[in-house]
Image (tube, coloured by chain):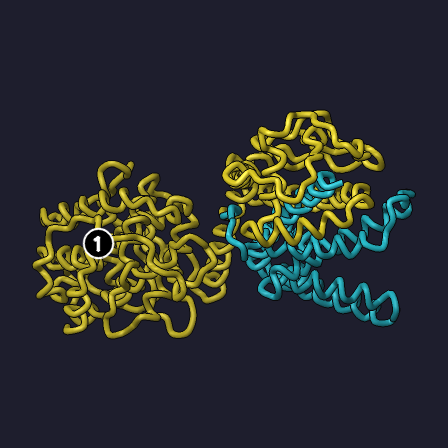
Chain colours: A cyan, B yellow
Amino acid sequence: MDLQNLNPSSLKSRFTARFLRALTEINAPKTISSSSPREIFQRYRRIKVAADKSMAYSVRSRRIWSRATLWRLRTRSRSRRLVSFGRRASVKTRTTASHGKENKEHHGAVLGVQAEELRELVPGGEAMDLCNLLDETAHYIKCLTTQGFCVYMGGLLCEGCC
Amino acid sequence: MGTWDNSMDQSDPFESALSSMVSSPAASNVPVSGENVMMRELIGKLGNICSSGDASCYTTPLNSPPRFDLSMVNLPNRSSLAAPFSADPGFAERAARFSCFSSSGNSGGFNDPLMDSFKLSGNQPINVDGSQSNKNSGSDKKNSGVSRSSSPENAESGVSKDESSVFQQIQSQNDAGTRKRKSTPREKPKEIPSPAADDAKVASENEESNSKRSRRNGAPAGNGNAKGSNDGNEKQRKENSKLLEPPKDYIHVRARRGQATDSHSLAERVRREKISERMKFLQDLVPGCNKVTGKAVMLDEIINYVQSLQRQVEFLSMKLATVNPRMDVNMEALLSKDMFQSRGQLPHGIYSIDSSPAFPYGYQPQQGLLPLTNGIPNTTETPFSMKTQGFLLPSVDGFTDAHPQVGPMWEDDLQSIVQMGFAQNQPQSYQGSIPTGQVKLEL
């Protein structure tokens, strides 16, 4: 798998651009003095969400996990305002998970336990059969490494320019 | 057949070689009626192998472009384009034998070159009767079947020289006229069972019979599928020969000898092969999984790796959260300058600073050290080096334990970016206060 994409439209560039923009938005209203653990934690949450969202947007809807991530992020943001919507979202997740399980058992997959764990890890993995799950996992791994790399670089950048 | 001739004239070396093989003494017992069907199927299968042997396991055969340049393959015998169909059975036999070799896990180590040789054919799928879809879907099946037993890494890596060598050997062997005893290339294969040739013939038979064949693993030839006059050969077959029916709508798979032939088990087998394909692909992706065998352990490794990556991102974002308050205007400047001016690569700007020899190691910024260790205890004092092994940071304060095997994956990225940085080496928007010593990376 080629992670050395250096063209401007590579995953790294797309992700980094979005992520940096999100970072500036997160940090803009903050002042230097806000360094209480709570603030830090809140900022961490936002940064993490920004990272995930940036990654998912960089991939758009080409992948199941990116769609699931985007959907999950939107759902969570909405569920804060509308609790019922969140409940509906969780219900939907359960049904898809049960469908996935049924399919798995029907085909007699030997790797049920690990497949289940993998499904929990990969966003949107509950509804996928093992074959697609492995597919998504491969792409997800690639994007996770890119994401980590860019966040790390972003950290360096922040240090560097401060 | 005219189409066959035309396609041959399109100068596909593999095709020409095959045709030459086909046209060499045909010791075929297959009745003429089944030849065309067999031919089509085999060609389709071969074409599919090549097209589906492309880099990604996940490309559909119809989409993946042919990978290998057959121009390097030196095939002497192109003259025998005229009479391909008369020798179809022979061609089918050989193709089937090759498929046996590559598809059979039993046959040992000579699968790969055959796989590669099969891939050659994918360059220009032989367009017999315009059954393009046949070949593609067929070869996809074939490829998946092969990859299960052989090593798809070889298949996908496309060792062209192996192919050409295999090819030439096949060619020479075919010219020798001993089609039956023809073995795979001498270098690679460890066993060249003579049943292979028989397998080929039986394969052609089965193709012609258009029914499901069973695996030839020395099982008694009781499968009744093989029709024709080659019943005696079935007993000698020791290898799998998996040929593809002309696909009707989707991927079709032939049952192997000794296996059930109902559609459920076939579909199951297809599924399993796909899964193992992807598992092997993931094995390449996840560092340190090369020695791991078995799906369960592999999956565990993959799960661990994904968890480590996710935790790594969390850790890094937490680190960012502590650093962030200091970052405001500079970020915009960097975004505007570094990101979009210099090839749109953020790390480029960073690396040009960090790895620049102009900045002494341990240079302290004028504004003072960033409280890197403020909220998150940082890693050890290892100075950040572009060439460092890993990127995955170790566990700090309850964060996950590092996955030291992540390292090698980052090296390429880092080095490439370092090269970029060194190439330009222009700290554009930095005010010169780069805490090179601040960057810490532990492996």
Q: Amino acid at mark 1?
A: Arg
Quadrant position of the C terminus of chain B in the picture: top right
* Residue A22 on image: x %, y %: 73, 56
- Mark 1 lies on a secondary structure that is helix
Residue at 43%, 60% (x, y): give it: B260
Residue at 65%, 35% (x, y): give it: B403
As displayed, is residue B340 above or below residue A92?
A: above
As displayed, is residue B1 above or below residue B183?
A: below
Residue B357: quadrant of the picture: top right
In this rendered view, identify the residue nearer to me: B155 or B262. B155
Residue at 56%, 49% (x, y): give it: B342
In this rendered view, identify the residue nearer to me: A156 or B307. A156
Left or right: where B62 falls relative to B230: right
Left or right: where B203 falls relative to A154: left
In this rendered view, identify the residue nearer to me: B205 or B389. B389
Residue at 60%, 34% (x, y): give it: B405
Residue A49: quadrant of the picture: bottom right
Left or right: where B153 falls relative to B307: left
Quadrant position of the N terminus of chain B in the picture: bottom left
* Residue B221 on image: x %, y %: 30, 55
Residue A136: quadrant of the picture: bottom right
Q: Which residue is mark 1?
A: B94
In this rendered view, identify the residue nearer to me: A3 or B8. A3
